[in-house]
Image (cartoon, rainbow, N blue to C red):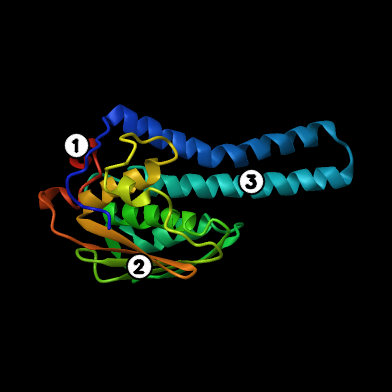
Amino acid sequence: MSSPNSPTLTLDGLDLAALLCSRVCHDVISPVGAIVNGLEVLEDDQDESMRTFALELIGKSARQASARLKFARIAFGAAGSAGASIDLADAESVAKGMFSDDKTKLTWSAPQALFPKNKVKLLLNLVMIATSAIPRGGVIDVAVSGDGEAPTFVFKAKGSHARIPPHVEELMAGSPESGTVDAHGILPFYAGLVARAAGMAVRFAIQDDEVTITAEPTVIDAPDAAEGEASDTALA
């Protein structure tokens, strides 16, 4: 279980921002590069079949880049003023957009409701952690129950070679074994920060080819900070 208390590693605001920016850039560089390649083909190749291929590549890559940026805007960004709520339908839309052309399928069951921002951020970050639990693809089932004040999130990731992602539990607890965090580990580390700010505890379990991630309310030391923006001060 990821501990909601006593992280041993803290990042200052500049380091956290830099690592999150690296993560977003990593996610969008591939589709943006494909768009550039497609445009070069259109400029230099007059073969009709190649031009058709290039247009299809540009369209697909533009949709991927847009979906990843929309996801990052909510999962990592401000997406509204401090203390704001986010519609779970918007969270579902951006989450499903991440998997529209992927080997992983996403199913979603949640009430039609506005939830506090940090809880929605946690929900989306855990979707991505669930994705890394099934490296060869499969199905991720997301179930949200309860209201915005005390929700429960359950993610079931099922696929070949399912595993609890390496180091994810200590990174979410803020206590990585190495004592440091890099761009590859920033997502679970950030998810742990958001979980503590939202007053949620996260635990992992695995059985056969299915990993289950559960997030539930827990008691935290500073409840007034739980529903606000996941600021550097609140998350440190």
Q: Quadrant of residue 105?
A: bottom right
Q: Earlier in the sequence, mark 3 or mark 1?
A: 3
Q: Which residue is mark 3?
A: 61
Q: Is residue 11 above or below residue 55?
A: above
The Cα–Cα distance between marks 3 and 2, rounded to whole angstroms, is 31 Å
Q: Is residue 79 visible?
A: no
Q: Mark 1 falls on what kind of element? A: helix
Tell me the kind of residue under disc 3.
Answer: Ser
* Residue 143 seen by the camera: yes
- Closer to us: 22 or 177: 177
Q: Which residue is mark 2?
A: 154
Quarter-of-image position of residue 218:
bottom left
Q: Which sits earlier in the primary sequence, circle 1 or circle 2?
A: 2
x, y (%) of residue 101? 61, 57
Q: How far apart, in angstroms, are the residues tagged by discs 3 and 1?
A: 37 Å
Q: What is the C-alpha distance between the residues marked 1 and 2?
A: 28 Å
* Label 3 SS: helix
Q: Nearer the viewer, mark 3 or mark 1?
A: 1
Q: Residue furthest right?
A: 47
